[in-house]
Amino acid sequence: MTFEQIEKKINLAQAINREEALWLLIEADLLKTGWLADNIRRQKHPENRVTFVVDRNVNYSNICESQCKFCAFYRSADAKDAYLLDYDEIFAKVQELADHDGTQLLMQGGIHPTLKIEWFEELFRQLREKFPQVQIHSLSPAEVIQIADLSDLTMEECLQRLHRAGLASVPGGGAEILVDEVRKTISPNKIGWKKWAWVMEEAHHLGMRTTATMMFGSTEKPADIIEHLFRIREIQERTGGFTAFIPWSYQPDNTELGGTASTGIEYLKVLAVSRIVLDNIDNIQASWVTQGALMAQVALYFGGNDLGGTMLEENVVAAAGCAFRMSQADIVELVRGAGFVPARRTTEYQVLEEY
């Protein structure tokens, strides 16, 4: 196998296979792989635009039954610092988002032991009434499964009811690595990869767009990363429902799992291979939240075309000791400094404004 053979396939718009993707990840030259990814990004986004959304991540509770080993955020229900926000507290946070012309509410909590669907339905109805300009891009497949189980509903019934109440799109949280052998090590109490995919495909069937994520750098092998990418690719082939893919690196501080964080070089390689494999997903997010501003700029030349959200609030990654912060003005300046046109977008990638 040679780089030239893979390059030829890509130039002919042919999808690479798992073996070729694994070779790119572990054998190929970083800069050459980045160049391939950058070419795909340029073809998909010839306008030289890098997008972002003004959003807020409201973690409505830190009480979680999953107790994943890589997570520093969760608490047991009887912990002194366990919490569940009430509606008024959530509304106050969303009001601040609206005051910043925000358009996306990313609301996620733990796998809560008692919250049934009625709590979420009423919350979403009131949010939609009070803040019609804000898209409710919330929950995760694991949360949907938990809500369904507690409420004696099928997953499909649960998702349909949440959608009718105001849930407009679903983020890809909880994907970690979509290989059950890895999941049993790092998150043994969380749903398996097939249930994650099940929720996503049902959301797509209902007309809801979703994102897909990957947390790498914990205990997985390179082949697991590639399997994850191809499982995402195959779902997209069936449904076309993913708007974006977001790879981010495991943050080990304050976690039970421990270990060391991935290097910037490892991050860029995974990002580039993600762009190459997922040629049927339009957008690849560069994670300034875990990588910082300067690495995010470099990532825009390794396949990334989007910088995610401004995140007026973020607690989960911050609990693991990673606390990069950027304002909307910071993101605009970052994009310009990298040689691109900054553009504010909606959750579904409609451009609202260029800067």
Image (cartoon, rainbow, N blue to C red):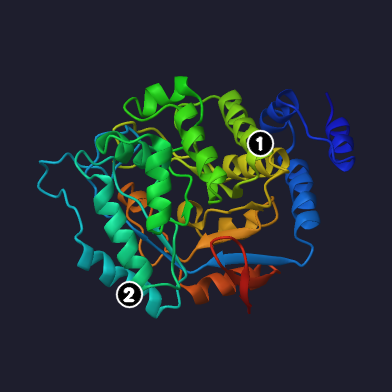
Q: Amino acid at mark 1?
A: Arg
Residue designated by label 2:
95
In the picture, the disc for residue 227 is none
Residue designated by label 1:
238
Residue 204 appears left or right of 152: right
Query: Where does the image place residue 122, in percent across and percent down from the top left?
Result: 27, 58
Residue 213 appears left or right of 303: left
Determine which quarter of the picture holds residue 75.
top left
Who's the residue at 85% across and 41% down the image? 13
Who's the residue at 79% across and 63% down the image? 46
Residue 168 appears left or right of 113: right
Q: From this view, report whether residue 135 is shown above or below residue 301.
A: below
Tell which tag, 2 or 1, sits nearer the viewer: 1
Looking at this view, name the residue that lies furthest to the top.
181
Q: From this view, report whether residue 110 is shown above or below residue 282.
A: above
Who's the residue at 65% across and 45% down the image? 240
